[in-house]
């Protein structure tokens, strides 16, 4: 039995990952991606299309249906300096957002910057952790981002945005807009595969968790219990909770789906729309 009193260290999770093994582009076919299967003490290499072989009638497969925002954009200040800003959190008013910017401490409250399409944004606050708080001077922020925004690709990919990223850095079942990064595990599923899941007698449930700024933040503490978790908006409807509770087995696709389920588990298995900062570690729930 795991020792629940054992303190976990960041270094406990260190491992070597050669740079040549980090894919910078997706495969032509989503379901051709490799899948590592650990079952009955055995480890084997499969492909995502083989996922169906591990389903049983009565299973419930849980996906995160959040849609990625093209949240990264360039803006120029009054002195002609260019800045790259990545939005991560909307306030109650969708015209005011927090965003990450490398030179956020160079800004003053009231500074005005101009985006590539001429839209003006105003700096209304700065914060060491959250970055810059921006007010958009426009009617529809999402329309502006759709015109000039770029998909916020993970920094480890080390490449610029390409034309097909808007399609491929998005799940085929993405719906409500709100994520700063894709729920990555779901990127490998096709429309055909989603249909086949249900044809095997399993049910599909699409919960929502909007991936926030925490996905980009490094863990700076050696003691994991001291790491500050960022909150993320998530939701499981009562109808979805009933389906999940009645499942033979629950299969979570990706860590965002898992975090949503774990958050619901501590709230009597019903999760109205809210923000959660769930930390999942190998030996216990926290």
Image (cartoon, helix red, strand yellow):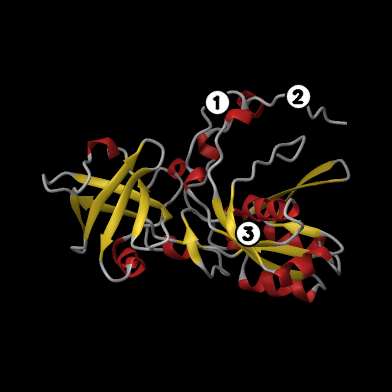
User: Count of labels shown?
Assistant: 3
Helix, strand or loop under label 1:
loop
- Find disc 2 in the rendering and name its residue: 6
Q: Nearer the viewer, mark 3 or mark 1?
A: 1
Within 10 angstroms of label 1, few (less than 14), some, or many (20 or more) residues?
few
Q: Which of marks 3 and 2 is in front?
A: 2
Q: Position of residue 144 (x, y in %)?
A: 30, 66
Location of residue 241 in the rendering, given as x and y in whole percent from the top left corner = 75, 66
Residue toward you, 172 or 175: 175
Residue in the image at 76% along x and 37% along y: 284
Q: Which residue is drawn at 18% across and 52% down?
A: 112
Q: Give the Cα separation between the discs numbered 1 and 2.
A: 16 Å
Of residues 100 and 84, the one drawn nearer to the viewer in this rendering: 100
Category of crowding for the residue at label 3, using alpha-carbon neighbours closer than 10 angstroms: few (below 14), some (14–19), many (at least 20) = some
Q: Determine whether the residue tagged by mark 3 lies in a helix, strand or loop.
A: helix
Q: In this view, does 196 lie above or below 43?
A: below
Using residue 1 as the reference point, say whether residue 118 is left or right of it. Answer: left
Q: Is residue 159 above or below residue 57?
A: above
Q: How crowded is mark 2: few (under 14 residues within 10 Å), some or many (20 or more)?
A: few
- Quarter of the image with the N terminus is top right
Residue 282 percent location from the top left of the image: 74, 36
The residue tagged 1 is: 221
Residue tagged by mark 3?
Answer: 32
The C terminus: image quadrant: top right
Residue 14 visible at all? no
Q: Which mark is residue 51?
A: none
Judged left or right of residue 199, residue 157 is: left
Distance between the alpha carbons at the discs numbered 3 and 2: 39 Å
Q: Which of 23 and 229 is in front in this view?
A: 229
């Amino acid at each position: 039995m795991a020792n629940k009193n054992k303190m976990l260290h960041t270094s406990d999770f260190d491992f070597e990952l050669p740079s040549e093994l980090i894919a910078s582009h997706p495969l032509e076919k989503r379901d051709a991606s490799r899948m590592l299967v650990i079952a009955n003490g055995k480890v084997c290499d499969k492909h995502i299309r083989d996922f169906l072989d591990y389903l049983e009638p009565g299973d419930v497969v849980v996906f995160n249906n959040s849609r990625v925002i093209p949240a990264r954009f360039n803006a120029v200040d009054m002195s002609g300096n260019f800045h790259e800003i990545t939005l991560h959190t909307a306030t109650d008013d969708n015209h005011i957002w927090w965003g990450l910017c490398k030179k956020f401490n160079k800004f003053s409250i009231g500074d005005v910057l101009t985006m590539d399409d001429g839209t003006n944004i105003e700096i209304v606050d700065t914060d060491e952790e959250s970055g810059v708080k921006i007010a958009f001077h426009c009617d529809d922020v999402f329309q502006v981002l759709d015109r000039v925004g770029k998909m916020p690709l993970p920094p480890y990919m080390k490449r610029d945005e390409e034309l097909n990223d808007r399609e491929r850095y998005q799940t085929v079942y993405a719906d409500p807009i709100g994520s700063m990064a894709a729920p990555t595990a779901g990127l490998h599923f096709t429309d055909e595969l989603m249909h086949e899941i249900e044809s095997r007698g399993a049910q599909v449930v699409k919960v929502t968790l909007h991936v926030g700024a925490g996905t980009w933040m490094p863990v700076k503490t050696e003691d994991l219990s001291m790491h500050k978790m960022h909150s993320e908006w998530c939701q499981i409807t009562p109808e979805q909770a009933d389906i999940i509770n009645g499942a033979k087995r629950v299969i979570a696709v990706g860590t965002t789906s898992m975090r949503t389920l774990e958050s619901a588990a501590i709230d009597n298995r019903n999760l109205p729309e809210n923000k959660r900062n769930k930390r999942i570690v190998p030996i216990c729930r926290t």
